Image (cartoon, rainbow, N blue to C red):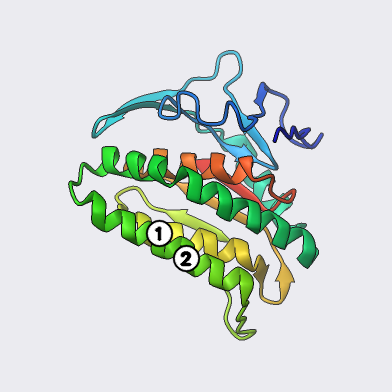
């Protein structure tokens, strides 16, 4: 399924890239781009990208600081209805299952681990738990997840962040109010994994303003 979105007029004028499902994973480990409001943002004229090599991955990172504050504002104004959210989550679950080998390949190449079987089971378990949350939501109104989620520079704990992101998307509420999720990533080792996850989320046609990914 192909779905294009138009950028909000408040976002900076630059070159935007919308990815359809047939293109979403082409050259997956070449470019890590900011993703705001359903749009992948490409560098404009005179803007530079940082080329790097991590493990067996060669990729470029475009950090567009000018959209960071706008992403947070959009997340703050996010609203949803439960039916639309559930439909998105079902699409996301299906896409996660079909692209799980790609996620595993990305993190394996970045962290250079050999225990693929173990991490395959871990990712499968996270997806399984997400299915349970979607089917049988258990919400503690006294607990909240911070919707501005930071992945620090030396962080390699992809399991924690992967679980957090999926858990938040199942219940995008902060202190009793609808709130989109903004993920900032400084960790080069986790950059491609979460860029790939972002493309999977995009392929699943998320609700507007629900999710942003900002490589920093």
Checking the image for residue 128, the label placed there is 2
Q: Look at the image and tell me in which quarter the N terminus lies.
A: top right
| Tag 2 secondary structure | helix
Q: Count residues near mark 1 (Cα–Cα under 10 Å), then give few for <14, some for 14-19, many for 20+.
A: some
Residue 166 vs residue 184, the one in the foreground: 166
Q: Residue furthest top?
A: 45
Instruction: Judge whether residue 80 can be spotted in this image.
Output: no
Mark 2–mark 1 Cα distance, whole angstroms, equals 6 Å
- Tag 1, which secondary structure? helix
- Residue, disc 1: 124
Q: Is residue 48 left or right of residue 113?
A: right
Residue at (34, 61) in percent of width and height: 122
* Residue 160 visible (yes or no): yes
Quadrant housing residue 43: top right
Residue 111, image x, y percentages: 25, 44
- Are dots 2 and 1 in contact, CB under 8 Å? yes
Q: Which mark is residue 50?
A: none
158 and 216: which is toward the camera:
158
> Which residue is pictured at 60% across the width and 13% down the height?
45
Left or right of 135, for residue 52: left
Q: Is residue 96 above or below residue 7?
A: below
């Amino acid at each position: 399924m192909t779905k294009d979105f138009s950028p909000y007029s408040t976002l900076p004028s630059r070159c935007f890239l919308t990815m359809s499902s047939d293109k979403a994973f082409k050259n997956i480990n070449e470019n890590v781009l900011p993703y705001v409001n359903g749009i992948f943002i490409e560098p404009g004229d005179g803007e530079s990208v940082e080329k790097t090599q991590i493990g067996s991955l060669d990729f470029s990172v475009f950090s567009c600081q000018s959209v960071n504050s706008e992403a947070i504002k959009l997340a703050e104004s996010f609203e949803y209805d439960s039916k639309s959210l559930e439909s998105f989550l079902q699409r996301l679950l299906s896409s996660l299952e079909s692209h799980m080998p790609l996620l595993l390949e990305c993190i394996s190449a970045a962290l250079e681990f050999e225990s693929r079987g173990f991490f395959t089971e871990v990712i499968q378990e996270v997806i399984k738990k997400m299915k349970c949350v979607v089917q049988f939501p258990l919400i503690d109104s006294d607990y909240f997840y911070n919707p501005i989620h930071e992945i620090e520079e030396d962080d390699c704990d992809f399991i924690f962040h992967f679980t957090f992101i999926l858990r938040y998307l199942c219940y995008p509420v902060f202190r009793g109010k609808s709130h989109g999720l903004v993920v900032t990533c400084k960790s080069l080792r986790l950059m491609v994994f979460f860029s790939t996850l972002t493309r999977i989320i995009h392929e699943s046609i998320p609700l507007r303003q629900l999710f942003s990914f900002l490589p920093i």
